[in-house]
Amino acid sequence: MPELPHAASVHNSPMVDKVIPLADHRYASAVPLIPAALAAPTGSLNDALARPMRDLRISVTDRCNFRCSYCMPKAVFTPQYEFLPQTSLLSFEEITRLARLFVAHGVHKIRLTGGEPLLRKGIEQLVGMLSELRTPEGRAVDLTLTTNASLLAKKAQLLRDAGLQRITVSLDALDDAVFRRMNDVDFPVADVLAGIEAAERAGLGSIKVNMVVKRGTNDHEILPMAAHFRHTQVALRFIEYMDVGATNGWRMDEVLPSAEVVAQIHGVHPLEQLEPSERGETARRWRYQDGAGEIGVISSVTQAFCRDCNRARLSTEGKLFLCLFGTHGHDLRALLRGGASDLEIASAIGLVWQQREDRYSELRATGSDAAKAMDGAGPRRVEMHYIGG
């Protein structure tokens, strides 16, 4: 590990990151600058566009047991693919230490993701550690997890007992043949539904189900999914197929706009739109007029919501990413393992966030040169399995 800059050694350094390549870096990264004037977190931290930091998404593994074409296509992620070695991953103690600093800066929601987070051995231990975190106001952090539910039937009660509050399940079809084709490992839909039932029995409230809609692949499953989860406590979310990373062969003609999803469902089960529950909410919510529940649509392609984005993302081995479409991260693991104090790391995080200007999806929608440059040659965008959704 290269020698890290400490506060005393960077007083006269320019306010830029120093790029330090490491063998296990999949994406460009830099050790964040520790500013000369250290500043303790205040519970309120805004970026350059006045967006607060409220949501932290932590990827606990880059591995997954599914090979969905929009995330980890089998042609790329073969049995020979080299995932990150165990020594590169943040330990549970390191994750908790960083999470505590983010919470001190104003984060009140933490989502564990992946890869498939339930593949991380002892994940319920991490949940227990994170469940003890408190905001500056003394409130428990909203702790949730996103999973493909392949292991959820076995893990649901352990997760709930450890302090997990909510869960989101990825499910792209009810038709078994369609679902098996999409996960590309011949995993049956019945086992996912069993995982959802186990989560309900365990008391994991406000269960959400996310369906990535890909035109020509599973769009005919929209109405069956809606019908299945009506009159339940499960909130169904339809997500536009996104151009995350560079391995999924994304094409705009495979994107089904969320407006068409809503129109399809409204034509059979009349809907009425709900107001957002909080700033930065990614889903636009709709309620069935007959009181049978609600759905949501996440329109990150056709109706970008960058202006309210309050999410920071921490990769499996400790890189801070400021955007789902980012090309480089900020290496917090280097600070952790280089002996930096909590105050130094918190100050470095604060400086990174305050300089944040990311809004790729909005720029792409306007056809700006900046977005075109990001889509062209140069550093590749981070992959979904590496940083989580």
Image (cartoon, helix red, strand yellow):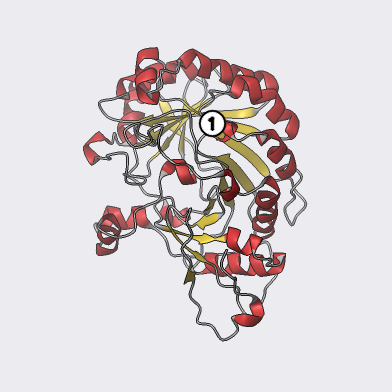
- Say if 333 sits above or below 39 in the image: above
> Which picture quadrant has residue 270?
top left
Q: Tell me residue 69's x, y (percent).
A: 34, 32
Q: Tell me residue 179's x, y (percent).
A: 39, 19
Residues packed near mark 1 inside 10 Å, few (<14), some (14 to 19) or many (20 plus): many
Q: Determine if residue 164 is in view.
A: no
Position of residue 334 in the picture relative to residue 223 (left or right): right
Q: Which residue is mark 1?
A: 147
- Say if 283 sits above or below 279 in the image: above
- Say if 146 sits above or below 379 in the image: above
Position of residue 251 in the picture relative to residue 104 (left or right): left
Task: Kindly identify the residue that appears in the image at 59 percent across and 58 percent down.
Answer: 333
Q: Amino acid at mark 1?
A: Thr
Q: Tell me residue 285's x, y (percent).
A: 47, 36
Q: Determine if residue 153 is in view.
A: yes
> Which picture quadrant has residue 177?
top left
Task: Kindly identify the residue that appears in the image at 63 percent across and 33 percent down.
Answer: 166
Q: Quadrant of the N terminus?
A: bottom right
Q: Tell me residue 176's x, y (percent).
A: 40, 13
The secondary element bearing badge 1 is classed as strand
Task: Kindly identify the residue that appears in the image at 48 percent across and 46 percent down.
Answer: 387
Question: Which of 238/351 is in front?
Answer: 351
